[in-house]
Amino acid sequence: MTGEEPLRPQSLMLTFLGDQVLGRDVCVYSGSVIDVFARAGIGEQATRSTLSRMVGRDLLRRQREGRRMYFGLTERSEAVLRDGERRIWQTGAVNRHWDGTWTLLGFSLPESWQRQRHDLRSQLTWSGFGPLFNGLWIAPGEVDVSALVEELGLAAHVKVFRAHADTGTDIGQMIEETWELSDLAGRYEGFVRRWQPWEDGLPDADDALALRLRLQTEWLRIVRRDPRLPVEHLPDDWPAEQAEKTFRAVHERLSPLARDVSERLLDLVPARLQA
């Protein structure tokens, strides 16, 4: 079962690590990972390449035990996984507690800085911002962009403010003009179509772990693209709540079987302190 877009092996790997390694102080055998990923439709070579690339990006570390190679988390991957965990289980897909605050970010870059402009816009989009005007972007709530701006080396070219809209501002219309609501709604609706059948069905026991891996990866990809706009200013039929209910119901249904599979398939060893 696949989503509308193929799921990247690294995204699946991060989900797998968040489920099976995060918080347990263990490393997982490469052969176990290859076995699980084969069940998710990812070939051995692609899995091995993903593991190697993630080591190169400081997202994994190697630990040899005899003739076997195990992989564990780094500080960087642990931070990424904790953020994903919060996004799924704590922040959620529906923003019911907005206090009226907006974060505004204004920037002015030289015309020749096309790459920097592209990188900034991409990072802002990822952080929940939308373009209110050409050089003025906006996001609901208080968003800390200091690390993002510093990493891009643009602190001298960016100004950040907190603000409230004036009485009389049509916030619903502003949201429609600033964000691609139809695209985001389509992602939630597609998720429900693909996964709702599993609210009542059960897969073969051996497929449960791979199926839950895809479920969580696809859900995190959608909610990470969601700027969490205040629900009171979204259309009445906004599909995020139904999609979240589907996600949680299917996750709960698959989890007992997935746990059984992981206990049977995964070779885990205690993580050793790095020299």
Image: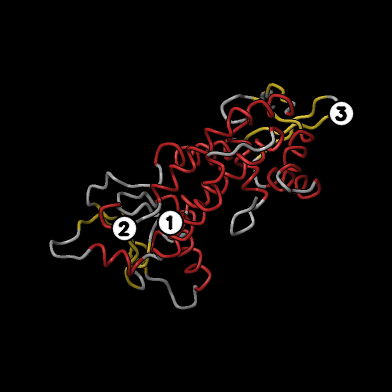
Residue under the image location 66 percent in, 25 percent down: 260
**CA distance for labels 1 and 3:** 44 Å
Proximity of marks 1 and 3: CB atoms separated by less than 8 Å: no
Depth check: give the residue in front, 69 or 243: 243
- N-term-proximal mark, 3 vs 2: 3
Residue 67's label in the rendered image is 3
Which amino acid is tagged 2? Answer: Val
**CA distance for labels 3 and 2:** 53 Å
Q: Residue furthest top?
A: 270
Which amino acid is tagged 1? Answer: Val
Which amino acid is tagged 3? Answer: Arg
Image quadrant in which you'd find residue 258: top right
Give the foreground label among 1 and 3. Answer: 3
Give the foreground label among 3 and 2. Answer: 3
Q: Quadrant of the C terminus?
A: top right
Residue under the image location 52 percent in, 33 percent down: 252
Question: Is 244 positioned to the left or the right of 174 in the image?
Answer: right
* Helix, strand or loop at mark 3: loop
Measured as percent of width and height from the top left, residue 60 is found at 67, 39
Image quadrant in which you'd find residue 256: top right
Q: Residue furthest right?
A: 67
Measured as percent of width and height from the top left, residue 149 is found at 43, 56
Proximity of marks 1 and 2: CB atoms separated by less than 8 Å: yes
- N-term-proximal mark, 1 vs 3: 3
Residue 160's label in the rendered image is 2
Question: Is 9 positioned to the left or the right of 114 in the image?
Answer: right
Proximity of marks 3 and 2: CB atoms separated by less than 8 Å: no
93 up-or-down from 139: above or below:
above
Label 3 Cα neighbours within 10 Å, binned few <14 / some 14-19 / many ≥20:
few
**CA distance for labels 1 and 2:** 10 Å
Measured as percent of width and height from the top left, residue 111 is found at 45, 78
According to the picture, the residue beneath numbered tag 1 turns out to be: 149
